[in-house]
Amino acid sequence: MKRSTFNAIGGWQPFLFCIGMYVVALFFSIFVCSSIFYALNTRSSVKDTEKTTIAAPSGKAQLASVNH
């Protein structure tokens, strides 16, 4: 009954832990940075996607977005 299978995994444990922490930190940093970016740039994006009402042929008001 050899127990060498778990000894091989134990050598990789610190390396796998560092890789896992790097992936988690990368995910959260992208999430936080994009949240801050979109929070600070709301005014410029609202001007680009303003909605105005136009009269439809049937007389009902419809919303149309302004695109470039």
Image (spheres, helix red, strand yellow):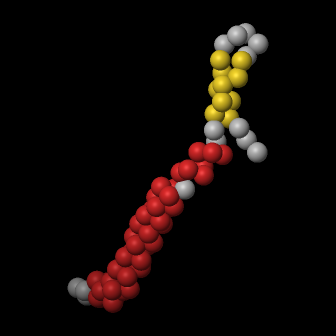
Residue appearing at x 43%, y 64% in the figure: 32
Q: In this view, does 45 lie above or below 23?
A: above
Can see residue 27?
no
Q: Quadrant of residue 21?
A: bottom left
Q: In which quarter of the image is the N terminus?
A: bottom left
Q: In which quarter of the image is residue 56?
A: top right
Residue 24 image point, x, y percent: 39, 70
Q: Position of 54 compared to 30: left or right?
A: right
Q: Quadrant of residue 19?
A: bottom left
Residue 52 image point, x, y percent: 66, 30
Q: In this view, does 56 lie above or below 44?
A: above
Can see residue 13?
yes
Q: In which quarter of the image is the C terminus?
A: top right
Of residues 56 and 7, the one nearer the viewer is 56
Residue appearing at x 70%, y 23% in the figure: 54
Residue 27 image point, x, y percent: 44, 67
Residue 30 image point, x, y percent: 48, 66
Residue appearing at x 44%, y 69% in the figure: 29
Q: In this view, does 28 lie above or below 9?
A: above
Q: Position of 11 compared to 58: left or right?
A: left
Q: Is residue 4 above or below residue 54?
A: below
Residue at the top extreme? 58
Q: How many marks?
A: 0
Residue appearing at x 46%, y 61% in the figure: 36
Of residues 57 and 30, the one nearer the viewer is 57
Residue at the left extreme? 1
Q: Position of 10 compared to 68: left or right?
A: left
